[in-house]
Image: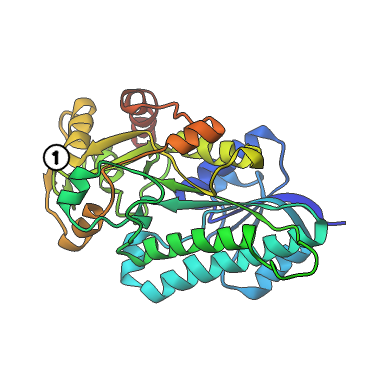
Amino acid sequence: MLKKTTLITGVCGEIGQALLETLAEKKEHNIVTFDLKPLPKAFQGKSTHIEGDILDESILAHLANEYEFEVIYHMAALLSTTGEKKPLLAHEVNACGTIALMEIASKQSRARGERVKFIFPSSIAAYGLPDLKTKTEHYYIGEKECTEPTTMYGCTKLYCEKIGNYYSEYLLQLAEEAPVRMDFRSLRFPGLISAFTVPSGGTSDFGPEMLHAAAQNKPYACFVRRDVRIPFMVMPDAVKSLITLANAPLENLSTRVYNVTSFSLSAEDFEEQVQKYFPNAEITFEPDLKRQAIVDSWPADLNDDAARKDWGWKPDYDVTRAFEEYLVPNIRKRYR
């Protein structure tokens, strides 16, 4: 008999580690984790870990044959900066790897007559504003506005949102009997900040990198202009949003893709927060034109009214609480 299971891919990344920690504490799930890397020592024993490539068909076949998935949290992806350096690989991992997992969720849903939930973290990279004038005039961006991404990462996120909707709503629509389809749900995240994991190549990482460098008494050259503004969220709220959306009744959902956010900061705002707690921080601004252009194409803030209305989304951390209670104490402890 197959084991009913929650799967977390990309578990060694920032979101994956935080999600595993939270789900393991609840002790409600048989958890399988999957990543290219071995599970960090601090997390060993919290899951059955499989080390391998999301593109390895033999590993995916093993997962499909060994487990019955109730929920799949698909965190594995190449992030924006890395994706621009290796666009073909980013497409393979972010698009093809995701679709391969959707196939598993889809087939298991039909075989069991029970929807497998497929929880997918999308990104503000799915947006693409043409210029700074538009970014200023259209401050709060909704889910259906300005979806013209300028990076391979953003393109694959938007594409997988569309494919997830297809697998959930239209797959096998010409079949004689209506199939039970998987249940795709996605969150478009702002820039995410963790106190416990080091930033790993995201274009929104100028803020977290600034904070981690200051805590280590290292100088930091910020790769965007002072005036650049994007939305942010701390990791506990990111995990909360994923789990809350996964637990929401399907009939309450008006869409399969939701914005979520907490607070919006410019790079200068972030610098002020960092220097408030680390007065000796050495921060300079040396914009990288390519990465700068990417961030300029992202919204200054997100409209997350739909998430608040449909499934009660509300962040626990505003900017003051984020720094005072979560980021600064834990990052100081990390580098002490």
From this view, report whether residue 180 is shown above or below residue 244: below
Residue at horizontal 52 percent and vertical 54 percent from the top: 75
Q: Amino acid at mark 1?
A: Glu
Looking at this view, is 114 or 15 the one in front?
A: 114
Whether 274 is drawn above or below 299: the answer is: above
Residue shown at the point (16%, 38%) measured from the top left: 268
As drawn, is 15 to the left or to the right of 147?
A: right
How many other residues sit within 10 Å of disc 1, few (<14), some (14-19) or many (≥20)? Answer: some
Q: Which residue is mark 1?
A: 282
- 222 left or right, relative to 335: left
Spot occupied by residue 298 in the image (x, y as percentages of width and height)? 28, 51
Task: Locate the N terminus and report the quarter of the image it occupies.
Answer: bottom right
Q: Nearer the viewer, residue 173 or 196?
A: 173
Q: Is residue 195 visible?
A: no
**Quadrant in which residue 193 is drawn:** top left
Question: Which percent across, then down, holds residue 301?
Answer: 30, 40
Q: Is residue 189 left or right of residue 203?
A: right
**Label 1 secondary element:** loop
- From the viewer's perspective, tell me whether residue 246 is left or right of residue 127: right
- Which corner quadrant holds the C terminus? top left
Q: Residue at x 38, y 56 (%)?
A: 126
Residue at left offset 20%, top offset 50%: 134
